Amino acid sequence: MQDQQQKKRGGLSPELNLVPKDLRHIHLMGVCGTGMASLGGMLKEKGYLVTGSDQNIYPPMSTFLEGLSIPILDGYSPQNLHPLPDLVVVGNVITRDNPEAMKLSRLGLPYLSFPQALRHFALKGKRSIVVSGTHGKTTTSAIIAWILEKAGLDPGFMIGGIPQDFQTNFKLGKGPHFVIEGDEYDTAFFDKVPKFFHYSPWVTILTSIEFDHADIYRDLDHVVESFRRLIDLTPPEGLLIANGDDPRIRRELQGARCPVSSYGLLEDSLWKPVDISVQEDFTRFRVIKHAREYLTVVTPMYGRHNISNLLSAVVLADFLGIAPFVISDAVRTFRGVRRRQEMLGEKRGVLVLDDFAHHPTSVKATIEAVREKHGRRRLIAVFEPRSNSRRRNVFQARYASSFDNADLVMIPEPPLMEKIPAAERFSSQRLVEDLKKKGLNASYFPNTDQLLEALVDKVQSGDVVLIMSNGRFDNLPCRILKRLDNSEMVPSG
C-alpha cells in the first residue's frame, strides 16, 4: 500500500483529492483511537454512513461511539470490508500485515490516512491553527477553542482529550478557524511523515521540543528536523507562536520565514506572566505584552506548565483581535480537560487526581504543580510507563529525577513488555531502586491489582493520590475511589 500504487488503482491521493464523487459509506480502521473516533463523529455529522473496526474496544471510546450510533466490528478481519465501503480511513495503529489492511490492498478500495481524511473533510476552507510540541498540546488546544467559542467565532476543533466546557473533543464549527493538535508521530504505515505535515498551518503554536517517540525517531536531532519543517510550513501571512523558554525552539526561530511572537516565563520573551499567585481555588497573574501590562488573569488552572500553555493562547487571541476582557472571561471560566490534573473525587478525605502525564518532563511538571497546589497534604504518585516509548529504556535514567516532590511513589510492571526487545526494555524495578537510592519512598508491583491492594492499605485521610498514565491503567483511578468508599480510613499524622 504505497501512494504510487494507490494512484495506479484509482485510490485517494492527498494532492489530487480524488475522493469518490458518490461517497456514502466510510469505514474507519482503528476506530477506537481518540482521533479516529472524533473523525467518525464529524463524518457522521456530515451525513455519511460510518462503520469502524478495532481490537481494543472498551470505555470511554466504545460508549462514545455507541452514542454516535457508529457500529464497531470487534477485531480486524477481511470480512469487515463487506459490504464494500466507498472509502477506508486507516489509523496509524494499523500495521502492514494487518489482515484487514491486506484485504484492503487486494480489493483496491480508495483509502486515506487519518490526517489526510481530517484535512479533506474538516480543514478544507478553514484557517488551520496547529498546536504542536512535545508537551501541552491538548490543554493549549482546549483553551484556544474555548476562547474562540466565548468570542463568538464558532471554531472547529479536534482535541486529544475531552474539554470539560464542550464535553466533546470535536466540533465542525461554522467559523473560519479550526484548532488541531499537531502530533509529530508518523501518519500511517504507508505514510511515515509526521501527522502535522498534513494540516497546512496558518498559525503554528510550538510549546516545546524534546526527544520522544523513540519507536520512530532516531534521536533529538531527528525530532528537531520534523519541527523545523513544520515551522517552514507556516506562511508569511500567518504567525509562529513560540515558547521562548525552550532553548531548542529559540535556536529554530532564526530560520522562520513567518512572523514570530515569543512567550514564556523568562525575561526576554515578548509575552510573559508576572506576580504569579497560587491560591486554593485559582491562580492569578498579570500578562505583560512588549513590556506593557496587557491583562490580569484569574484561572482555576495551576502549575508553571499550564501558565505557559495559557499564555500561548492569549498571544493567539490577541493576534485574532479578540478583546482582552473576552480573553479574561474565557480563561476564568475554562474548566480544563479530562485526565489533565482532573479531580475525580474525594473519598474519606483522600483526593484522587487523574493525569495523562507520561514523558519524564511532564511527570515532573505535573507532580510539581500538584505539590504547589496541595503543599500540606501527603502526595502519593502512581505512575504507569505504558506507551511504546515509555516501555523502552531510553528514558530509564531521566525518570529518576521526575518524582522528587512526591512523598510516596508506586510503580507497576509495564504491560506488553514482551513486544519490546529484551535489550531495550524499561525496568520499573530499576527505577524504584534508583528512587530509593535518592531517599524516596518508592515501591514496585508486578501488576495493577497488587498495587491497588497496597495503595488502599497505605492511604490516609488527607492524602492526594495522583494517577499518571497515557492509557486506561486497568481503570485504576475509579477502582481506587470505589475501594475508598468501602474502607476504613487511617487518620493522617
Image (cartoon, helix red, strand yellow):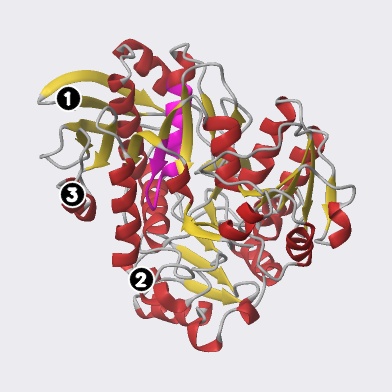
- Three-letter amino acid code of the residue under disc 1: Lys
Q: Earlier in the sequence, mark 3 or mark 2?
A: 3
Mark before the other along the chain sequence, 2 or 1: 1
Magenta region includes residue 144: yes
Is label 2 in a helix, a strand or a loop? Answer: helix
Q: What is the C-alpha distance between the residues marked 3 and 2?
A: 23 Å
- Mark pair 2, 1: CA separation: 35 Å
Circle number at residue 250:
3
Could you say which disc has been placed on residue 289 in the image? 1
Single out the mark in the foreground, 2 or 1: 1
Horizontal side of 348 relative to 237 (left or right) equals right
Residue at x 35%, y 64% (from the top left corner): 211
Image: 104 above or below 99: above
Tell me where residue 396 sits by quadrant. Answer: bottom left
Residue where numbered disc 2 is placed: 398
The 10 Å Cα crowd at callout 1, few under 14, some 14 to 19, many 20 or more, is some
Q: Are marks 1 and 3 in contact (CB under 8 Å)?
A: no
Q: Main secondary structure of the magenta part?
A: helix
Tell me the magenta residue range. Answer: 130-147
